[in-house]
Structure formats: structure tokens, C-alpha cells
Image: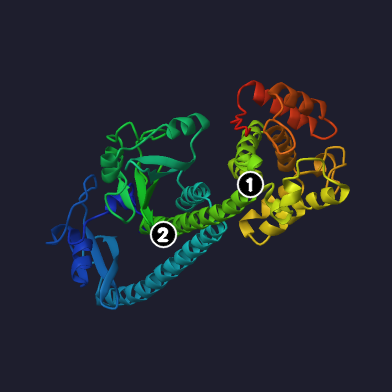
């Protein structure tokens, strides 16, 4: 752990040179037995082990154990040129010093362990807090791979998740360059390979560099044949995955703290993935319930069957053209599904009226965006959808309803749904008219750009339509 010497005979000695197994040499013997040794003539001591590369010299060695609760935690060794250089007083002084050093060393180790444990607990708490706000499995995996890379100070981490066929796919990664990320997405580990290298035990485990070098190519994107730590995790009902962290340094050895941190992150991943799965189940059940309401609405009008679903699909196609991220596309799809849900609060005689509506009937019909937002308002995860539902009939020029919003004050999702809703309505049979020809519907949308519709949305819609991205089943009723 430390040494000090000033004589030329000891020059060149290092901590590495002095390392010796317990039980070997004078120092090792003291460590093994817990009893002091005074070698007045060290060369001729029965326990002496000569250090290769050092000269044979006349020296005296006094070695005493460092003990804490009768357990040897180290040794203190004095070497001095010449024979018979120490006496009984020197032994007593050194034993007293060793006893005090053992207590101090134990205290320092306990303090370091407590500090390390506190740091680990705080780090894992921060990860836990981030995961409690995450309900999407993809985001969970991004959080945990980032956390493992930071906590273990390693350059690259990937998460692998079992697919329905039993193989494993990379679900998230950190530290890879863009081309490696693309290559990583194309990988798949077969179940036999995963059982050997990802899930051989349930605790975090270590793959040395020589094993990493022999791994099959299905794993090795961005790998540099340095040691790897693997942290498996599972969640209910059948979820199974593993985080794979690369040391980045051939000499890196993972410490007990590293394994504890990896286990902590894996446990948090298990909880978060389980929560995300349960949330997805609840969300699916809720959406089925609300879709029943949408179907009930469409049952009031035989002409609008499937309208909500098709508007949602078209809106998502346009949202992708705008480069919306997946979470926004999901909200856009839900808004498309529920954009007319408020018509449940409008009389059937108004919805199915074959002719023009009176002013009073029109005012009643125009309440449906507000009613729809009120229906969905109690649902926490649908909060981002409410502004799109309420603004689904706001016009670009400000002449829409219910709030008279104009231009970019109208949420983009609402502007997209407005165009998609109009297109689908015009190209479908209704109680008061037959479906318009496709070209006529497109002409009317183009003509209303800048007044009724956002011109940018119209441009993107027409471009997507021209490229065949807009699908409409044209299920006319005659």
C-alpha cells in the first residue's frame, strides 16, 4: 500500500515489486499467523523470500501485524542495513504503532464504504426519480443505459430485450456513433447465444477480454475486445432483458461497487419496465373503452362508420411528414380517433339531418369540440390531446370555433386533423350528399389553403397524397 526508503540499496523497489502472497516471505508469514517476526539477519531467516533483481545485503527486518478485532488487516515492516539493528523496545513501539494504524485504517475503510454507499444510493435515487416519470418502455431503456454508463464511467452500453420469438434485440444504446447505432438496430441475438452471454446468471457478471474477442458477430458492433459487464433484468409477465456495458480499457477490472451499482440499475429497470407494461395494459383497456364510445357515436350515423379510425391514420401519415417524434405521433393518433367524440352530446336528429342545419342546430353542433375535451379531461395521459380536440374546427383565418383561434395559435395537431377530417368527409358518402370525386376534394382543400386551412399543412398533405401515402377505403353506402 505504501513504502518509504532513502538508501541506495533500496532504489528501484516499487509497490508491484514488493507484492507477495499471504504466507510467503517474512511479510507474508506475519500476515498469515498474526505474530511479529524479528529477523536480525534477514538473509538467513527461515521465512525469507528473496526479491528477484535486488542485491543480497546484510539487513535486519522487523515485521508486525496490524490487527483489528484479532483479524489481521495488514503488516508494518521495517528494514535496516546491518545485523541486529532492532531491540525489544523497537518491537513494542512498532506494535503500538501498528495497533493504532489498524484502528485508523479500519475507520478510513468504513468511512470510504459509507461514502461510496451514500454516493451509490444518491445516484440510484436520481435514476429512480427519472424512471418514475417514464411510462414508455423505450424511454425506460434509454434512461437505464445512460445511467449505467454514467455510474460505472464506461463508454458504451446497450440494452437487449427478448422478442416474441425468443431472440434478443438491442432496444437502446449510449456511446455509439451514428453509423454504429444503425448497424446495432439490425442485430439479433438468437436465444442460445443470449442464454450463454446475456443471461448465464441472474446477477451482474463479468466477461473478460479473451471471451469478448470470441463473441459471435451478432453482438459485436462497436465492441473493442475490452472487458464487459452484463446486468440481466426481468419484469412481469414474461419480460426479459440485459444491459451490456463495455469497459473501453483492456485493464479495467469491475469492482464490487460496480456490481452493486449494476444490480441497482438492473433492479430499477425491472420495476420501471414492469410499470410501463402495466401502464400500457391500462392505457389499452382505456382506449378500448373510449373506442367503444367512438363506435357508439358512429352507430348514430350509418354514414360515418370507420371515420375516426381513418382520420387518425391519415393524420399520423401527415405527422410523420412533419417529422413529429413518436410520442407526438401517438397523441396525434389519439386526437384523430377522438376528434368527434363530443358529438355524443349532440342530438341524433341533428347529426342525421339530410338537409342544411338551422342556425340553432348549427350552434348545437358546434359545441361538440368543447364537449369532447370535457369527456377526455379526467384522463391524465390524454392531457396533450385536449387542445387538439378543442381546436379541431378552428380556421387559419380565425373564423372557426369555439375560440376563434387563428394561424399558429392553433395547435399543429389540430390543423393537421382539420385537413384530414375535411378530406375524409368530402370523399365519403354522407346523409346529405354522395361522396365527392377525389380530384374535386383535393381541389377544394387546395382552394381553402390560407383561409380555412393552414397552407403549410395543405402543401404537405397534397404532397403525401401524390406519393400514395394517404389511404382511404372509400366504403360508400348507397
| Distance (Cα) linking label 1 and label 2 | 46 Å
Q: Which residue is mark 2?
A: 267
Q: How is the image coloured?
A: rainbow
User: Which image quarter: residue 78?
Assistant: bottom left
Query: Horizontally, is 177 left or right of 313 in the view?
Result: left
Q: Residue at x 41, y 71 (%)?
A: 110
User: Which image quarter: residue 473?
Assistant: top right
Residue 206 is at least partly visible in this image: yes
Q: Residue at x 67, y 55 (%)?
A: 383
User: Which image quarter: residue 454?
Assistant: top right
**Viewer-proximal residue, 348 or 226?**
348
Residue 73 position, x and y percent, is 29, 68
Query: Horizontally, is 407 left or right of 40 in the view?
Result: right
Residue 264 position, x and y percent, is 42, 60
Residue 64 position, x and y percent, is 26, 70
Q: Residues within 10 Å of mark 2 (few under 14, many from 20)?
A: some
Say above or below: 268 vs 246.
below
Indicate which label's residue lies in the foreground, 1 or 2: 1
Q: Residue at x 66, y 62 (%)?
A: 378
Q: Which residue is mark 1?
A: 298
Q: Secondary structure at mark 1?
A: helix
**Viewer-proximal residue, 236 or 65?**
236
Q: Quadrant location of the C terminus? A: top right
Query: Horizontally, is 183 left or right of 68 in the view?
Result: right
Amino acid at each position: 500500500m505504501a513504502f518509504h526508503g532513502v538508501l541506495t540499496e533500496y532504489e528501484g523497489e516499487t509497490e508491484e515489486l514488493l507484492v507477495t502472497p499471504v504466507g510467503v516471505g517474512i511479510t507474508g508469514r506475519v500476515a498469515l499467523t498474526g505474530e511479529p517476526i524479528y529477523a536480525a539477519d534477514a538473509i538467513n531467516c527461515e521465512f525469507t523470500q528473496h526479491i528477484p533483481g535486488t542485491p543480497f545485503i546484510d539487513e535486519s527486518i522487523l515485521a508486525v501485524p496490524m490487527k483489528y478485532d484479532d483479524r489481521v488487516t495488514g503488516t508494518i515492516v521495517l528494514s535496516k542495513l546491518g545485523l541486529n539493528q532492532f531491540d525489544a523496545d523497537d518491537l513494542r513501539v512498532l506494535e503500538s504503532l501498528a495497533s493504532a494504524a489498524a484502528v485508523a485504517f479500519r475507520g478510513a475503510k468504513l468511512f470510504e464504504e459509507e461514502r461510496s454507499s451514500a454516493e451509490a444510493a444518491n445516484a440510484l435515487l436520481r435514476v429512480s426519480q427519472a424512471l418514475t416519470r417514464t411510462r414508455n418502455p423505450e424511454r425506460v431503456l434509454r434512461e437505464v443505459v445512460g445511467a449505467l454508463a454514467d455510474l460505472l464511467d464506461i463508454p458504451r452500453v446497450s440494452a437487449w430485450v427478448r422478442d416474441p420469438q425468443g431472440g434478443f434485440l438491442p432496444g437502446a444504446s449510449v456511446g455509439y456513433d451514428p453509423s454504429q447505432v444503425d448497424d446495432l438496430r439490425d442485430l439479433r441475438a438468437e436465444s442460445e447465444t443470449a442464454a450463454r452471454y446475456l443471461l448465464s446468471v441472474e446477477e451482474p457478471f463479468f466477461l473478460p477480454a479473451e471471451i469478448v474477442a470470441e463473441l459471435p458477430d451478432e453482438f459485436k458492433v462497436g465492441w473493442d475486445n475490452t472487458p464487459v459487464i452484463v446486468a440481466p433484468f426481468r419484469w412481469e409477465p414474461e419480460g426479459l432483458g440485459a444491459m451490456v456495458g463495455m469497459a473501453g480499457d483492456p485493464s479495467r477490472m469491475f469492482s464490487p461497487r460496480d456490481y452493486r451499482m449494476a444490480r441497482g440499475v438492473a433492479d430499477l429497470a425491472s420495476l420501471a419496465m414492469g410499470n410501463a407494461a402495466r401502464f400500457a395494459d391500462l392505457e389499452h383497456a382505456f382506449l378500448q373503452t373510449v373506442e367503444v364510445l367512438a363506435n357508439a357515436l358512429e352507430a348514430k350515423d350509418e354514414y360515418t362508420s370507420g371515420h375516426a379510425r381513418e382520420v387518425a391514420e391519415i393524420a399520423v401519415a401527415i405527422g410523420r411528414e412533419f417529422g413529429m417524434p413518436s410520442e407526438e405521433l401517438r397523441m396525434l393518433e389519439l386526437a384523430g380517433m377522438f376528434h368527434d367524440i363530443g358529438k355524443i352530446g349532440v342530438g341524433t336528429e341533428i347529426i342525421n339531418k339530410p338537409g342544411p342545419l338551422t342556425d340553432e342546430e348549427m350552434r348545437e353542433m358546434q359545441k361538440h369540440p368543447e364537449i369532447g375535451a370535457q369527456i377526455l379531461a379526467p384522463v391524465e395521459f390524454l392531457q396533450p390531446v385536449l387542445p387538439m380536440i378543442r381546436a379541431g374546427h378552428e380556421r387559419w383565418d380565425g373564423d372557426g370555433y369555439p375560440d376563434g383561434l387563428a394561424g399558429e395559435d392553433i395547435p399543429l395537431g389540430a390543423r393537421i386533423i382539420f385537413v384530414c377530417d375535411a378530406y375524409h368527409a368530402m370523399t365519403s358518402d354522407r346523409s346529405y350528399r354522395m361522396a365527392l370525386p377525389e380530384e374535386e376534394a383535393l381541389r377544394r382543400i387546395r382552394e381553402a389553403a390560407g383561409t380555412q386551412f393552414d397552407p403549410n399543412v395543405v402543401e404537405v398533405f397534397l404532397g403525401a397524397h401524390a406519393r400514395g401515402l394517404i389511404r382511404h377505403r372509400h366504403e360508400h353506402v348507397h
